[in-house]
Image (tube, helix red, strand yellow):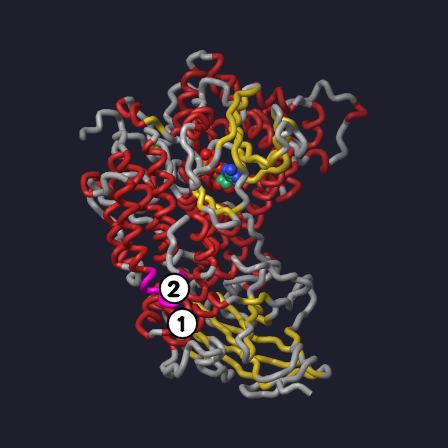
Amino acid sequence: MVEDRKPLAGAALPATEATITLVRRARDGDGQALEALCRRYLPRMQRWASGRLPGYARDLLATDDLVQDAFYQTVRHIGDLRAEREGAFQVYVRQTLLNRIRDQIRRPHVMRTLDALPEPDARRASPLEELVGQQTLERYETALARLKPEDREAVVARLEMAGTYEELAEVLGKPSADAARMAVGRALARLAKEMGHER
Amino acid sequence: MKDRDRRLELLSLNVSDGIDPDWETLAEATGDESERKEIGDLRSLSLIAGFYRQRRREDRTAGVEPGTLWGHLEILEPVGQGSHAEVYRARDTQLNREVALKLIRGAGDRGAPPTLTLEGERLARVKHPNLVVIHGAESRGGDLGLWMEFIRGTTLHDLIQSQGPLSGREAILLGVDLCGALAALHAAGLLHRDIKAHNVMREEGGRVVLMDLGAGTDIDERTQSLSVSGTPLYMAPEILAGGSGDVRADIYSLGVLLFYAVTGKYPVWADTVDGLRRRHACGERRRLRDVRPNLPAAFVACVERAIAPDPGGRYASVGEMEQALSTASGIAASRGAGRAAVRGKADSTWRRIFSRRRTTIAALASGAAAVGIVLFLWPGLLVASHYTVDATLHRVADGAHAQLLPGARVSPGDRLYLEFEASRALHVYVLAEDDRGAAFLLFPLPGQATGNPLPGDMLHRLPPDLHGRRYTWGVSSAGGTEHLLIVASPDALTDFESTLAALPAPQVTGGASALPLDREALSGLRGIGHLLETEPSADPESARPAFSLARRLAGGPERNRGIWVRQIDLVNPGR
Ligand SMILES: Nc1ncnc2c1ncn2[C@@H]1O[C@H](COP(=O)(O)OP(=O)(O)O)[C@@H](O)[C@H]1O
Ligand SMILES: [Mg+2]
């Protein structure tokens, strides 16, 4: 039998196709597709943002709106969607959101009143910064950016989105949960090495 | 450097699995500054992972709190997470009975096809004792729900992961049951399309249940183009190549499932779907005979035929396959002398699986079979390089520490500990057995902060310290001889570990508890004794302790390769 369709890179699993198809349709202005995509993605992105926003920002910014807005913009402007894997889309959304949050934090908070001023450091740090320290988190980001796309996708999907291995198999285009697990293991080892170069 | 990479990868896997090693000890154990930093960074990664894992757990329980109503169903607790759906134990408030509710949230949109209601419709059309019974399906507020009988049990996949592969005989019985369920589906004009070990459950009473028709299709829909569904490792090559397949594709998957059930491996394996297609294309596959040589020939032939690359080479129907398996079961039954005849029907299958512990021991009784099984169980044996081990057993009595030599007398109230040092990281297992064959695992235990592998080039004290406190093993009851067995291996003894994982967890009150071992766990270890020690075994089936054949522990460094096994016998005559 001759394959007449372009072979998909990695995998052709139904859920993967569904998300990527939804993204394409949403980008092209299909409102229903966008809604469906939001239902699928907003909860995990909100969870993700909750670890990244400083304490004061969590109070003052409407996190949900920030995330939703960033997500809409991402999908609308995703342009040429080269991502064949859902994992690549996930990483892309996460990166956009991170940039947004950084912008927000740098911007002076005009709406902040004097008595709402945060205590110095504690409120300035995001939960993750509190957990591992700001420098480590920065090294993590830099190292993550240096990884091969597949490794980056594996790290984000498992560490930051807390995906199960079954889910990861689909998101990363692996044939089994076990294969996804091994991929994450290898990606984390490379990430740790890469972080070492950052010191 | 190689060792270091290996350690890093193992540790990374732990982080990914959400298992926290004892970071401080690990870091202390590392002489190399940059490796210590790597370990520190992995620890940070583990913290990040833990943070989001916890958040997700909270989100999930917040989503569907116990007590929440979904239509007339009251959700009780989450029980499983499939690829597209969440599964809950629920109560049907109208009929007041327990059900399993499978939910796809937000599936009412066009993005996800309403597979669940399809699954319900399909299954409602067929009834078979080995097929899950569907009660209803409904779409509600954007969620799709399917409720069915609640199966109290385990998936075949989890069972094999935790207890290791099935025997040939057990797999035959499993195959016969699944053939029956599939035949019923096929007779109703349906294909399953997602046969895999995750989608077969074993009920506590022993019944085998095939479930999850989410990927099923009507046989008549064949002509329509289908996206690839199901799990690639179980997929027939013609499906992977983009074809739609027929009943013979289900037969192929069932063959893969049986292959997996007796080996824990897949006939064709790759870590990407493309790789899998390539391997299929060039005919690269494992032969069941090569992976596990000691299976009944008729069973092997049956599996190989089911997974023939060309659909034309397979059985034409599941009925035909069932017949072949039944014939094989006759052969297996007559081999299993002294056991109940194989009835081949559902309720008995899994009881047999749980009674298989004894049969493994019987298989080990003959020398040739023992070597076969042992080679299968301990593949690491053939590849390991040299290392040194220094192990000594010590006793604390009346505050004084003394090294114990083989044959030393111990008495109730004595406390023991082991000092262990090796030139490389090793997986260490410590067991105790008395003359009557009652055996316990002393290390590693779930809940202990220190686990395997123990890093090389440092002195370890076992049982490990916990929360900064020292522990010892206490000698409790008196009578006869106590045997302590220490096994060390460069590679994790995965088969042994999966046997262990299936045992009831002990109450770990400190670092010094013990886990009672069953016969199968021991049979594997007895196998080590056979293989590593040249002493002939006089009567391996007697009540003799399983590992009384290992070389004695002398103390002082020893050079070794492969698996290192030492035994120390202690006389415990009582007062
Ligand atoms: N009827 C049931 N009774 C008990 N547990 C179930 C039942 N159905 C599913 N489960 C649990 O939920 C998990 C996922 O179910 P499954 O139907 O395979 O979902 P998916 O179609 O998403 O793969 C199963 O592995 C099993 O642990
Ligand atoms: Mg399933």
In the image, taking residue B312 as reference, residue A24 lies left or right, namely right
Q: Residues within 10 Å of mark 1 (few under 14, many from 20)?
A: many
Q: Nearer the viewer, residue B112 or B35?
A: B112
Q: Is residue B385 above or below residue A1?
A: below
Q: Quick one: quadrant of the N terminus of chain B?
A: bottom left
Residue B130 magenta: no
Q: Residue at the right extreme?
A: A115
Q: Secondary structure at mark 1?
A: helix
Amino acid type of the residue that numbered disc 1 sits on in the rendered structure: Gly
Q: Position of residue B511 (x, y in %)?
A: 65, 65
Q: Which residues are magenta?
A: B333-340
Question: Is residue B386 at all visible to an observer of this figure?
Answer: yes
Residue B527 badge: 1
Marks counted in the figure total 2
The residue sitting at 47% across, 76% down in the picture is B547
Q: Position of residue A197 (x, y in %)?
A: 48, 48
